[in-house]
Amino acid sequence: MQDVALGDALDSANEPHLGPWGLRIQALTKGFAVAGGVGFIALVLMSLVSIVGRKIASAPITGDIEMMQMAGAVAAAAMLPFCEMERHHLRVDFFTTRLPQRAKHRLDSVSHLLLGLVALLVAWRTGVGALSLREAGEASMMLLWPVWTVVAALVPSFLLLAVAGFYNAVIYWRAGGSAV
């Protein structure tokens, strides 16, 4: 009985492998994630300079909070596609632990497809929102930066997230057809 439990715990290693297109998508998502990480590091450094400047010389960086909000959103969005390609999104598999591997792969395929569809919807609506902000001429309060540029910068990450979700949906579906 203990061997069966150990076998169930090792089931998570039975993931479909990425094909040539998947490796290309993964490399692109890794580039986005690295760019997001560099963005966060830059924000931390900027924040430290602003805090020290505020405490020592009463001279913080003007608009530091605005920059944190805007750049933080873009950096965080850039990391989402890599999470999808690495399959590190939160997964609740309490109810599926006893299902055959084929059924698990098919359910995972549906979840990746839904994620891809939602990401595509979010990319579309974010793009529409960016165009609307551009037409309205909305700018940030302190720096007077055009807000639409920041919102538009989110769109590529959501599009790449959709591509990653659709790719994973296909490989999980195929794995579900061949799983034993």
Image: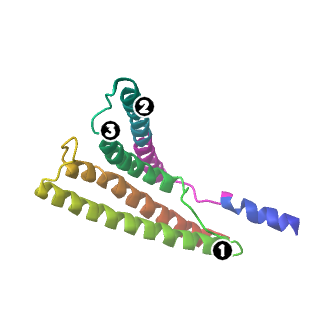
Q: Is residue 33 left or right of residue 140?
A: right
Mark closer to the chain start, 1 or 3:
3
Secondary structure under tag 2 reads helix
Front-most of residues 125 and 52: 52
Q: Is residue 78 above or below residue 125?
A: above
Residue identifier under label 2: 48
Residue identifier under label 1: 96
The segment highlighted magenta reads: 13-34
Q: Is residue 21 visible?
A: no
Front-most of residues 88 and 71: 71
Disc sitting over residue 46 in the figure: none
Front-most of residues 75 and 179: 75
Q: Is residue 63 above or below residue 121?
A: above
Amino acid on which the number 2 mark rests in the picture: Leu
Picture quarter with the C terminus: bottom right
Marks 3 and 2, Cα distance to the nearest angstrom? 10 Å
Please identify the residue farthest to the right as the structure is shown.
1
Which residue is located at x 88 percent, y 69 percent?
1
Q: Is residue 14 magenta?
A: yes
- Tell me which secondary structure the magenta stretch mostly adopts: helix
